[in-house]
Image (cartoon, coloured by chain):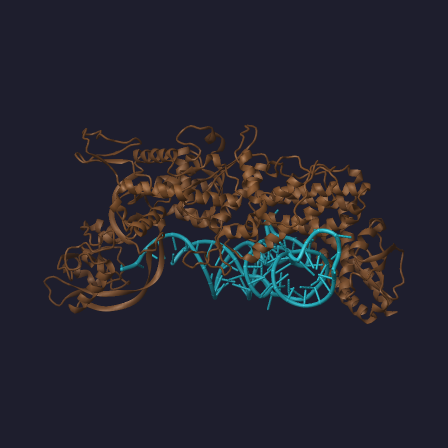
RNA sequence: GGAGGCAUAGCUCAGUCGGUUAGAGCACUUGCUUCACAUGCAAGGGGUCACAGGUUCGAGUCCUGUUGUCUCCACCA
């Protein structure tokens, strides 16, 4: 087959885009379904439609692409569904900010319909950006099946699910305290809130007791502005200090409202003053206390964070009001003291604004019944977390789950399909639009203004992208999906929701394995963030070092689930590896004649020992890489490919066969060419899932059978391709070469100074043909196997397989030789003693696996052979 | 308050079922214009595997405790 020359320097920018375009054009990413074959499917965690690719995406997509390319080469029906998420809050905020900046308008100024048009325009403008960025990474997603969470089909799925859950009584509307973001102007779910410890104060405030002048109750609060909404003060029923107060009436400071003192178990006597002001409308605990005691909800802070309680403070920002009210309390002598404290403050995960707990009417998913099968699936091992420890995080969350607030006071998203009748107040929930009230026939119907939490639609992603609620081939072929790949930070947001939605609507888990990875941090271990400005743009890395180097960096040097630090040093190391592979391939190509075939091997009888050795090593590598990839040990598998490529293939095998190759016309050269083409070809295939571009570029240059490496067959372990005897021979030769190099370096003998070698060895057959190796790799001018040799004027190098004599005349320092030999003898004797003890231990010999015991015996034999050589050497030196 | 991770070479990290003399990359030292590659080749130095116990024939690996560190969940005004 024809071969093609590779350019002299590895320059990924010259071919990555071209190869990717070709793969797309050929349709390799779209599976051709074959019912005989197993399926492997993945849905991408959809990035925000208007987002930009960051390192977290790059890691996530790289891991998925490794799995997908691996399975595709193994012949699975492999489907990777890509797509994007509408990201309600994030996207709406961006468009609103843009609107404010460019036109000085708010969304309310332009109105819902117009605003939504603007968001869709924004989506059209930026929605393709993240997709094209993904493509730069080389991901092999099936772009013909790309989805968006607000596509028609996915929206239909959302409506179907909402209506179904509502009909089952699992979705309800109710007045609850919700996390309200005054900046985003919407409710948030519990998972969308981040707590941070902040310095604050406890304000101790006196509440006068009605009708008992001079008598007060002192409450401590971190949020004095909520005082306006207090409708009671609570104490613990068992608190003797306040027993006689219960049932009495207090006068609310600054307001003058009369509020009762109630007894409630939830109050801790030993915290604060033991008296708690109850603000049911603005605190989750107070809300519940309020319900228990039938207290009124007095709303004093509105959705923008301003005081909405009539009077002096009306219209003030909550923090301004706090300041003024504290001053006023002080003036009235009602402020007892200000005690500094740190407390956890809730912030919006999108904009960072301090959350205002607010009682409001929201839609909820009742979680208890949905959570049960979702817990069982993981407990039973039906769904498996990799690494397993993340199942604990999941279960802990699932088992303590609270109802999920799914309504958002946004415009961008799936509008809740609930309709209110203005005449009879009936609420109708329906998949199709409602224009007439089914109860009273009125046409005064309004659809719910709120939209659904973004995670509501992404929870359906594993089946909505396969066509559900329609009955499709894709669902039958690819559901449940095989593996979900995502970061641990998103387990509660997304993974858990997909699990219960999948079980509820498909009667089947959405995926079998959840492969969890960690965060990509900067070189100092800090989280990459926009505000810190320490983020590294994956696209910059790609343009400088190539996508393959980036992918290598992200896939290596890190165990599953652990965070990793990203540094350009690592990318450079990866690029150097690519460069090494590139140049090794160039060397191979320079030697080919056009007769070779990357998938074939010469007849076994023609193979030399080194050929059999590398084939044995290759075979071992194939098995190990396959085993590790099956276990999601992508980093371990990659390290093994790296070691094989650099050490075994480049540093040893290529060097070993150079003498053969340079005699181009020989039969031996022909065999070497055939072997190395096969070994290189298989190595490229093993590496392809990690580094798709360079492997394809080289593969296409080599003689190859498949029109692309990405659809070539993945190498598989071949039990016949094991030659332990030849492998042992080569190990002996390599050990001797290393020992000679070592000694020469120690003695500062330059490689240019060649010297004759005399070998005394019981493995004469092994070393008979090693002359070429020794002259090339151990600076031998001549070489002779002898029965014994006079050591005068020689250095003597002892290994377990041979003793080598090098006549280096005046360079030999007898004293140094003696010292060195004695040291080595001591070391070897120590090892012999250690192993001897081990083997003399009855417990070890009887209980350890036979293979382990045998290995120890073998080691002992080698050490003993070495010791014999050293003792002889010492005897000569002492003569 | 509850749960979990991490602690191994100067740095960043691997170390799979408990079984080689504990490894890699980077950094460091020495030598090398060896005809694929200086983004390279060869050789080398560098470890109390946080600490203390325990289990075992055998522990970096399993168990208990301690210390340090990071994270998640919950949250009491």
Q: Extreme bottom residue here?
A: A815
Please provide percent x and percent y for residue A272.
Answer: 27, 64
| Location of the C terminus of chain A (image quadrant) | bottom right
- Number of disc labels: 0
Please provide percent x and percent y for residue A715.
Answer: 65, 39
- Front-lying residue, A575 or A8: A8
Residue A469 in sight in this render: yes
Image quarter of residue A110: top left
In this picture, residue A781 sits left or right of residue A57: right
Q: Which hue is chain A drawn in?
A: brown
Please provide percent x and percent y for residue B4.
Answer: 47, 54
- Front-lying residue, A789 or A778: A778
In this picture, residue A45 sits left or right of residue A696: left
The residue located at (33%, 39%) in the rendering is A414
| Location of the N terminus of chain A (image quadrant) | top right
User: Which chain is assigned cyan?
Assistant: B
Asked if A551 appears above or below A476 in the picture, the reply is: below
């Amino acid at each position: 087959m024809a071969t093609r020359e590779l350019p002299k320097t590895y320059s990924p920018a010259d071919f990555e885009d071209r190869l990717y375009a070709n793969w797309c054009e050929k349709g390799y990413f779209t599976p051709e379904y074959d019912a005989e074959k197993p399926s492997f499917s993945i849905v991408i965690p959809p990035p925000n439609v208007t987002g930009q690719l960051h390192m977290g995406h790059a890691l996530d997509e790289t891991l998925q692409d490794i799995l997908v390319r691996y399975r595709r080469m193994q012949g699975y029906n492999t489907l990777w569904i890509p797509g994007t998420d509408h990201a309600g809050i994030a996207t709406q905020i961006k468009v609103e900010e843009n609107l404010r900046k460019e036109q000085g308008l708010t969304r309310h100024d332009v109105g819902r319909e117009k605003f939504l048009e603007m968001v869709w325009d924004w989506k059209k403008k930026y929605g393709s950006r993240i997709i094209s960025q993904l493509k730069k990474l080389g991901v092999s997603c099936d772009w013909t099946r790309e989805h968006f969470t607000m596509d028609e089909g996915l929206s239909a799925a959302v409506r179907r699910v909402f209506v179904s859950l509502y009909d089952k009584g699992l979705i309800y509307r109710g007045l609850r305290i919700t996390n309200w973001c005054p900046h985003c102007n919407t409710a948030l779910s519990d998972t969308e809130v981040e707590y941070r410890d902040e310095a604050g104060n406890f304000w101790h405030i006196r509440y006068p007791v009605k009708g008992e002048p001079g008598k007060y109750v002192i409450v401590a609060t971190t949020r004095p502005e909520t005082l306006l909404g207090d409708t009671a003060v609570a104490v613990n029923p068992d608190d003797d200090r306040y027993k006689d107060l219960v049932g009495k009436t207090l006068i609310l400071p600054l307001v003058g409202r009369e509020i009762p003192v109630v007894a409630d178990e939830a109050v801790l006597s030993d915290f604060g003053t033991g008296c708690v002001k109850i603000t049911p409308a603005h605190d989750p605990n107070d809300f519940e206390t309020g319900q228990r005691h039938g207290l009124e909800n007095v709303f004093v802070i509105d959705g923008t964070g301003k005081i909405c309680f009539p009077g002096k403070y009306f219209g003030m920002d909550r923090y301004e009001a706090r300041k003024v009210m504290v001053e006023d309390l002080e003036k009235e002598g009602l402020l007892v003291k200000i005690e500094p404290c740190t407390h956890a403050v809730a912030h919006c995960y999108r904009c960072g604004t301090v959350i205002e707990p607010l009682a409001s009417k929201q839609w909820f998913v009742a979680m208890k019944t949905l959570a049960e099968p979702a817990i069982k699936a993981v407990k039973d091992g039906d769904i498996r977390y990799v690494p397993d420890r993340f199942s604990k995080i999941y279960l802990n969350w699932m088992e303590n789950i609270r109802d999920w607030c799914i309504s958002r006071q946004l415009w961008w998203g799936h509008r809740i399909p609930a309709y209110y009748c203005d005449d009879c107040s009936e609420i109708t929930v329906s998949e199709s639009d409602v224009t007439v009230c089914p109860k009273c026939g009125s046409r005064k119907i309004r659809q719910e203004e709120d939209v659904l939490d973004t995670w509501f639609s992404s929870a359906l992603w594993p089946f909505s992208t396969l066509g559900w609620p329609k009955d499709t081939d894709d669902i039958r072929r690819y559901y449940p999906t095989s593996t979900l790949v995502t970061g641990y930070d998103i387990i509660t947001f997304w993974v858990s929701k997909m699990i219960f939605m999948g079980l509820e609507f498909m009667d089947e888990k959405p995926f079998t394995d959840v492969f969890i990875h960690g965060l990509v941090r900067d070189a100092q271990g800090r989280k990459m963030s926009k505000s810190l400005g320490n983020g590294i743009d994956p696209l910059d890395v790609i343009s400088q070092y190539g996508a393959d180097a980036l992918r290598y960096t992200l896939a290596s040097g890190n165990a599953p689930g652990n965070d990793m630090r990203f540094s350009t040093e690592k990318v450079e190391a990866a690029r150097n590896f690519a460069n090494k592979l590139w140049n090794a391939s160039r060397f191979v190509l320079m030697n080919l004649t056009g007769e070779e075939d990357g998938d074939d091997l010469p007849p076994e009888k023609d193979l030399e020992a080194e050929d059999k050795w590398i084939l044995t090593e290759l075979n071992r590598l194939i098995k190990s890489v396959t085993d590790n990839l099956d276990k999601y040990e992508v980093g371990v598998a990659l390290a093994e490919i790296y070691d094989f490529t650099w050490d075994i293939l480049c540093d040893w095998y290529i060097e070993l066969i150079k003498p053969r190759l340079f005699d181009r016309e020989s039969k031996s050269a022909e065999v070497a060419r055939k072997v190395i083409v096969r070994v290189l070809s298989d190595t490229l295939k093993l590496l392809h899932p990690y580094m798709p571009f360079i492997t394809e570029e080289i593969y296409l240059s080599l003689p190859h059978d498949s029109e692309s490496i990405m659809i070539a067959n993945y190498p598989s372990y071949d039990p016949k391709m094991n030659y332990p005897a030849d492998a042992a021979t080569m190990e002996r030769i390599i050990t001797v070469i290393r020992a000679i190099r070592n000694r020469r370096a120690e003695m500062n003998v330059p490689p240019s100074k060649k010297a004759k070698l005399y070998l005394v060895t019981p493995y004469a057959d092994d070393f008979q043909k090693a002359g070429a190796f020794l002259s090339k790799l151990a600076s031998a001018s001549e070489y002779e196997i002898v029965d014994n040799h006079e050591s005068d004027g020689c250095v003597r190098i002892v290994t377990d397989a041979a003793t080598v004599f090098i006549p280096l005349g005046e360079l030999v320092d007898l004293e140094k030789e003696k010292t060195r030999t004695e040291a080595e003898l001591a070391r070897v004797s120590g090892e012999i003693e250690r192993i001897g003890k081990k083997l003399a231990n009855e417990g070890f010999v009887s209980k350890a696996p036979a293979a382990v015991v045998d290995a120890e015996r073998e080691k002992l034999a080698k050490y003993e052979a070495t010791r014999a050589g050293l003792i002889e050497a010492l005897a000569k030196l002492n003569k």
